Amino acid sequence: MELNSELVTEAPRPAATVMLLRDGANGLEVFLLKRHGLSDVLGGAYVFPGGKLDASDAQLDADLHLDMPLDALHARLNEPRITPAEAAGLHVAALREAFEESGVLLAHGPDGQAANTTEAAALLKDGLSFNEMLSHMGLRLHTSGVLPWSRWITPQVPSVTRKRFDTRFFVTTVPNLQEAVHDDVETTASAWLPPRLALTQYWAGEIELAPPQIMTLAELSRHPHVASALTVPANRPPPVIQPEPFDAEGTRVITYPGDERHSIKQRIWSGPTRLAYRNKRFEPLDGFESLFA
């Protein structure tokens, strides 16, 4: 993973990403996708399904296609500076990206029946937009099923990309009888992994992870099963995480809330409050086990 030192003056782009969870044989597992190596954003890295907000995401008819009112979706994000329609759009973006990138569609038909993901995918392939597909099939999205987890805002000097994003992280479970798979276009591989195993593979150099994924997986690793993880968004508003990088003796260091160099002194999570760029990746200063301290 190459280090970036360029200043980006444009405002962060609104985006959404979804942590798809399930209970596996050894406890909690999360779905990770490997981005295409030629991608201009985290090419070759393993990420959660997600992408930038589209204008159409906030234009969906809420009465017909959402299972929660706009005001409720607005309240759960805890962002008074955005409108209820924008808050709903971020939920829709999360659900749209989950379907486009993993094939998982959190929606039901007019009679409460599960969405036909094969038909939905075929309609998108035929050229219908996501909103048009929902209308054609009469589907209502399970916005209630994607819970806000955190909000990450890229600093003006991004460390692993040349773009800035204002990304809302959501968490959800995969519906029964649906299978998450990569699309072989934007993503070239995928895996269900316990969070600690994903971090073990990153530490061994088997997969690449960006700092937000490293820190989020470390937080997820503290939960033995899905039900435990879902208590987090149920009991707190999503924290805003604005990493603050600095260079020390030629090494890039990213600090997080609670670090002595960060402007916010209150911790958001256990574990490290900074990562340093070593061996062409970001690592905790005190070694692998400090991710779980």
Image (cartoon, rainbow, N blue to C red):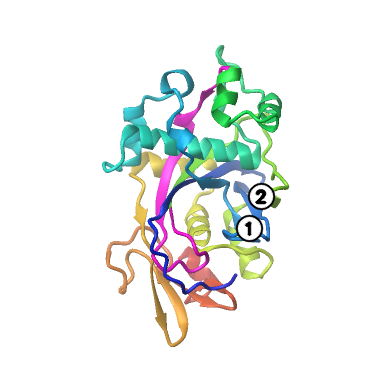
Residue for point 54% across, 71% down: 288
Q: Quadrant of the N terminus?
A: bottom right
Q: Is residue 15 magenta?
A: no
Q: Amino acid at mark 2?
A: Glu
Where is residue 23, by image quadrant?
A: top right
Query: How dense is the environment of label 2, judged by Cα within 10 Å: few (below 14), some, or many (20 and up)?
Result: some
Residue range highlighted in magenta: 138-165
Q: Tell which circle, 1 or 2, labels the residue nearer the N-terminal end.
A: 1
Is label 1 in a helix, a strand or a loop? loop
Answer few, some or many: residues within 10 Å of disc 1's Cα (few below 14, many 20 plus, some between 14 and 19): few
Label 1, label 2: how many angstroms apart (C-alpha)?
7 Å
The residue located at (49%, 66%) in the rendering is 291
Q: Residue 95, which numbered label?
A: none
- Determine which of the numbered discs, if any, sits on residue 186 in the image: 2
Residue beneath label 1, please? 39
From the viewer's perspective, is 273 left or right of 182? left
Residue 2's spot in the image, x, y percent? Answer: 58, 72
